[in-house]
Structure formats: C-alpha cells, structure tokens
Amino acid sequence: MAQARIGVVGLGTMGAALALNIADNGFQTAVYNRNSTVTADFMANAGDLAERLTPAETVDALVSSLERPRAVLVMVTAGAAVDSVIEGLLPLLDEGDLIIDGGNADFHDTRRREAALAEKGFNFIGMGVSGGEEGARHGPSIMVGGPAASYEPIRDVIEAIAAKYKDAPCAAHLGPDGAGHFVKTVHNGIEYADMQLIAEVYGLLRHGDGRSPSAIGRLFEDWNGGVLQSYLVEITGKVLQATDPDTGAPMVDVILDKAGQKGTGRWTLIEALKMGQSPSTIEAAVAARSWSSAKSIREHGERVYPSDDLHMGPVLDSDLEEALLAARIIAYAQGLSLLAAASDEYGWDLDLAQVAEIWRAGCIIRSALLDPIAKAVRDGLPDGQLILAPSFVDRLAPAIPALRRAAAAAIAGGRAIPAMTAALGYFDTMTTARGTTDLIQAQRDFFGAHGFERIDGGSGHHGLWGR
Ligand code: 6PG
C-alpha cells in the first residue's frame, strides 16, 4: 500500500471527520485511535474511502506508514492528552517531522509546545478548526499558527480540505506559535456572543411576545434570507421548528435551560481582560451560560421576585432583526479589537482581513457580514475600529435605534438581555467623547491620591478635596 501523506491520531467526532475529508481529497491517510475498536468501526463505515485509509494498530505502525518528512495530525481532547500523544510520538519521529495539533488548544499550551519541539528539531503547528462535524467532513475553516516553513509541506492538504469561499480556501497561516489557536479561541468567543444574542431575541419573541417556537423558527428562516444571513441564524430556524419525537412537543421545550461550555469562550474573556480589553458581548455570553447553570437559584429568585406585573411592549420584528444585526456587528468588532491587541502583545503581525476572509465559509460564525468586514479591514479601519469604518457606519447607524427600542421594551418587560445591553453599553461608551470617568479619577485621587490628568494639560495633578 502507498505510504500515507498524513497520519491522524484520534478518531473522535472531529478526528474521524477530518480523516475522511483528507482521504476524500485524494490523500492517503493513516489513522490511529487508542481504542482499536474505534479504528475498526471507523474503517467499517468509511465506504469507498477505505482504500485511501491506512488503519494502524499502534502509534509505531502509524508512523511507519507515513511519507517523509512525516506529518501527524493530533485530534485528541485539548490539554494533557495532547502532551501525552506528543510524548509517545517523539521517539518514533525524526528531526524535521511535523506534529499538528488540530484541537481547541489553549494557545499558551501551543506556544509552549511549539517552543519545546522546535528546540528538539521537530516542527509543530497549532491549527484551529471550525465548523463542527459537518465542517470537518466537508470543509472547515482552518486557522494555522506556527513557523510558516513548518506549514508549507502540508499546506496543499490543508487548503484542499478547507471550505471554499468563491474558490478561495478558508485556511491560512496566520502567524507564529499560538496565533492560530488564539484566533480560533476568539472565533469561539464571537460564537458565544452571537449564540447568546440570538437566544435573547428568541426569548423576547417566546416569553415576551408568547410566540410558538415554530413561528419563531420561521421568522429566523426568513431573516436568514436577509442582512442576518448566517450559519447560526440558519440552524436556529431549523432548531426551533424541530419536534421531540417522544412527546410531540417543540424540541427546545424539552431541553433543560442550562448551557454547557468547554472553555474557549471563557478563555477569550480571560485573555482579553489580561490585555486590558473588555469584549462586553462575549463577557455577557459567558456570564449567561454560567448563570444558566444556577437553575435552582433562578427558580427560587422567580418565586421571590415575581414579574407577572411586567409586560414587554410591542416590538416590531424588523426592529429585532436590526437589533440583532447591530449587536452582532459590535460582537465582531470587539473580537477584532481583541485580535489586534493580542497581535501586538505577542508580535504575531496578524492580518485581520485575512482572518475575516477565512471565516467567510466553513466556520460556525460564517455570515454575510464577513466579506464586508474583510473589505473594510483591507481598506484600513479608522482608529482600528470596525464600528468607525464608513461601510459599517452605514449599517450600524440605522440599526442602533432598533437596538435601543428592543432593549427598552425588554427591560420594561423584565426580560434578561445581557448581551444586547452589553453591546449597546459599549456602543454608547465608544461614541461619547466626554464620558464619566472624570468622576472615577476624582474618587481615586480622593481616597488614594492616585493623581489625574487635567483637560488643560499635564498629569499627576491632585485635587483639594476639602477633607
Ligand atoms: C467550532 C466550534 C467548536 C465547538 C466549541 C465550542 O468552531 O466548530 O466552536 O469548536 O462547538 O468547542 O464548544 P462549547 O460551546 O462547548 O464551548
């Protein structure tokens, strides 16, 4: 049998789908899973692709079946498992061979692994893959980080398996060491924000306006034909129209309202805060998931503070559509600012237009906005801000009043919309030249003699506070 172009370690959902995608694109692919039954089942279900797949019983056998220089894609759970797979591979590999971590790794781990492996003469790249199982199988968005030279030997494979936006592969080498995994992490932060914003709009229609899930699903389906066109709005339309086969009830009605998270949204926030960034929509989305898990407290709270006397006033569907558009743009804008800050902090020299370009297809946050975002970034963002780009001012300015109307109605009705209000709070702050932190500075100086800058110049001033 022909030597394999690449080996895949880990045949979980994403690893299996990627292996099939690689084989489907004509590359002989060696596969290994710690549990050989998983490998056997995978092969049994591979159909015609089985001839392009080389199953290996051991890591040793996997490595032996690879062309040189070897390339091994590690698709195991992020964290310690990755280190343990790498440790097992190293004695079997030669200098110049390549290990690719395709999981949702913490970019700090990627930086550490890349540096440690480079010292030993091995190549390592951290590769963020977005698109879920379907994307992995038929075309994900792929965010690569590591030395550019390490990516070169495998670039044709990665570009072949990636989603295409008008023939352009949604895969790119974005920068050194952890750049790819960091961009994937921020992608997920935006994903959390977008999902939360959609859920808030659903909540207003469902609980505020009393509409059925299927009616709301049809509305999302309609919206998906307009300015909100996106994967997440599309699947929301489908999800809301689905029925539970056991009870006949709308599927969403039988799902407990406690949201899980594997951590990438939280990591986005942690890293943002460390860099002095506050992507409020992402923060609100992470918080909303955490709060959701406190179900018994929420039930208790509802008994103590009944809200039957609160009523949400009428909100036009078109206002909700525009509100969601405005908040979504703000979430993207905050994500891009965070990427710019990280690029400076870690010396990555990220091309944010390229990031937006490879998010145009394949990934979970793909939407009709990403091509205009990429173009706006290519044209140069005024003050580095998407919300100041002329083409986005044209979108945001008319949509913000709708966001205000939707938020006002929701607040009056006692409906929780933490991400929408977080987006609006950011927008109002960033569009107010003279804010209120003069008072914060005065308070700080009062109790801690922290000093302040005067508007007529100079820093380190202190007030006579009449104490
Ligand atoms: C993607 C997804 C995928 C996964 C995340 C988020 O881009 O394909 O982001 O990576 O859904 O792990 O999962 P959590 O919601 O559990 O954090």
Image (cartoon, grey):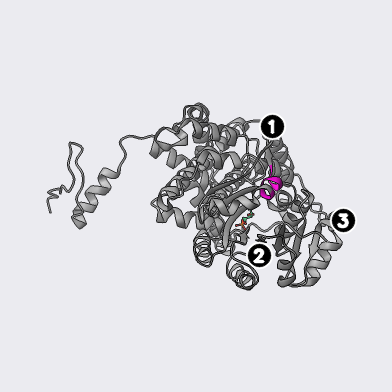
Q: Is residue 47 magenta?
A: no
Rendering coords of residue 11 (x, y %): 73, 63
Q: Which residues are magenta?
A: 157-163
Horizontally, residue 434 falls left or right of residue 465, namely: right
**Which corner quadrant of the image does residue 36 belong to?**
bottom right
**Which corner quadrant of the image does residue 4 belong to?**
bottom right
Residue at the image point whose x is 41% and y is 48% from the top: 344
Sooner in the amino-acid sequence: mark 2 or mark 3: 3
Relative to 210, residue 106 above or below: below
Residue at the image point whose x is 69% and y is 43% from the top: 163
**Disc assigned to residue 225:** 1
Q: Amino acid at mark 3?
A: Gly
User: Which sits in the foreground, 14 or 214?
Assistant: 14
- Asked if the residue at tag 1 contacts the one at tag 3, i.e. Cβ–Cβ closer than 8 Å, the answer is no
Residue at the image point whose x is 50% and y is 41% from the top: 351
Mark 2 and mark 3: Cα distance apart in space: 24 Å
Q: Which residue is mark 2?
A: 76
**Quadrant of the rendering where the N terminus is positioned:** bottom right
Q: Which residue is mark 3?
A: 47
Question: What is the secondary structure assignment of the residue under circle 1?
Answer: loop
